[in-house]
Amino acid sequence: MDLTPQQRRAATLAALLGNALEWFDFAVYGYVATPLGHAFFPAEDPGLQALAAFGVFAVGYLMRPVGSLVLGPIGDLLGRRNMLSLSIVLMGAASLLIALLPTHAQWGAGAGLALLGLRMVQGFSVGGEFTGSMTYATEAAPPGQQGLLASLATAGGLVGFSLGSLTVALLARSLGDAAMDAWGWRLPFALGGLVAFLGLWMRRRMPETLEPHHSDPQPAGAVGLLRAMGGRLAEVRQQGPLVLRIIALVSFANVVFYVLFVYLVDYSAHQPGSSLAQANSTSTVIQTIGLPVVLLGGVLADRWGKLQVNRLGTLLLALVTPIALPVVQLAGPSGLVMGQLLGVLPVMMSMGGQGVLAVEWVPVRQRCTVFSIAYSLAMALFAGTAPVVCSWLLEEQGWQWGPALYCCLFALPAWWALKGQGSRTKALT
């Protein structure tokens, strides 16, 4: 792209901060899953209550493929900036409504259904957000820095997770568990909904990176847009093998991330000697420590090669996961510290290096559509459901090794995706 250095800096900042704000809104749910379970899914069995709360968490991920089917083609037809602006509006509006939502005591079962619907809107929004921001950052990057800028977009999402964890930790510490259960869980959703509109203001000022010769002529009216979107989706069928490879590439690290930094944080908070505030504080500090590792993954991808860095990250993650997860489960509050410290380097390095590789696998004309669909399917089918699966394995079945073995299964398709793909990385860009 023919952008000035000032435009590149502005584009990178807008992509990073906008992604952080939107992922703050989306991630907060996981950190207040227990209070939400009490408010919307009252039950005598705490384990079933946790399953219900994390089930709605997973529904947000199940909606991501639906969002990718709409937002991905919009990004390829109308531009990355327009798609990213639409996604952050949807996320902010849904978060504000969750903050205002009556509970089960006021609306009965309708409250849980309303929460489910709003979580679906959030999932729809994220269907184009993460991949769109990573695509945008890669396209806005100067030659030789695509990995770094793509990893900055990834870091922006993780900053959102960390801010969500920090916000919940501070609220839980200052308000106490009783107030968090009663009304404190509303505050992070309200804050996230309000600041999302700051992200919209920033995104409307980003330069567009989709060059005209890579897109169809602007469709005329809503009917023309729908037809053009249908045409782009029809083209995706020709990219089936590539979609599978991207799913396999991104699933492993993301499954481990959601188990180690979302589900096991809530699990640890309910062990003797721990609390929600303590567990969230621990996770916030360790995720913050891991942010430079995300950028390191991007820098190494630029210098050593994207394929080599992803292979190294996958190998390290496969070796560490069977140790880190059981440590968290069995060693109490100190186990959360040790397990997350063990896992943070391979998880973050993998996530920092995989985005730019996936972006460059896809032709520019189909980039938002193919990448969004593949990534959203991976999150919906595997990463987003991982807390539910691990909650069932560990809390309902009592299988201590279940979460670690489940996560390690994803190492095999990840390695398959990286095998023999070196020539493809530059061929399609």
Image (cartoon, helix red, strand yellow):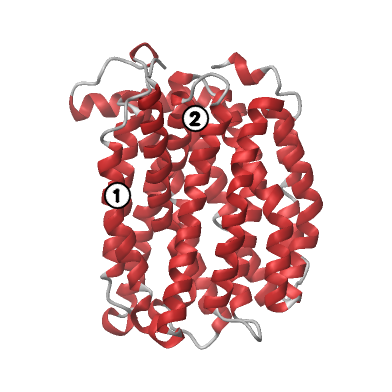
Residue lying furthest front in this view? 6
Mark 1 belongs to which amino acid? Leu
Mark 2 belongs to which amino acid? Val
The answer to which quarter of the image holds residue 192 is: bottom left
Mark number displayed over residue 370: 2
From the viewer's perspective, is residue 40 above or below residue 368? below
Report the side of 255 relative to 313 (left or right): left
Secondary-structure class at tag 2: helix
Q: Which residue is found at the position 79% from the left and 59% from the top? A: 322
Task: Residue under label 1, please give it.
Answer: 90
Q: Of the two numbered discs 1 and 2 on the same chain, state the one appearing first in sequence.
A: 1
For disc 2, the neighbor class at 10 Å (few under 14, some 14 to 19, many from 20) is many
From the viewer's perspective, is residue 415 above or below residue 40? above
Q: Residue 21 or 364: which is nearer the viewer?
A: 21
Q: At which x and y percent is residue 161?
A: 49, 57
Q: Residue 292 or 311: which is nearer the viewer?
A: 292
Q: At which x and y percent is residue 406?
A: 72, 57
Mark number displayed over residue 235: none
From the viewer's perspective, is residue 149 above or below residue 118? above
For disc 1, the neighbor class at 10 Å (few under 14, some 14 to 19, many from 20) is many
Q: At which x and y percent is residue 45?
A: 55, 85
Q: Quadrant of the N terminus?
A: top left
The answer to which quarter of the image holds residue 39 is: bottom left
Residue lying furthest top in this view? 213
Residue lying furthest left in this view? 221
Q: Residue 48 or 283: which is nearer the viewer?
A: 283
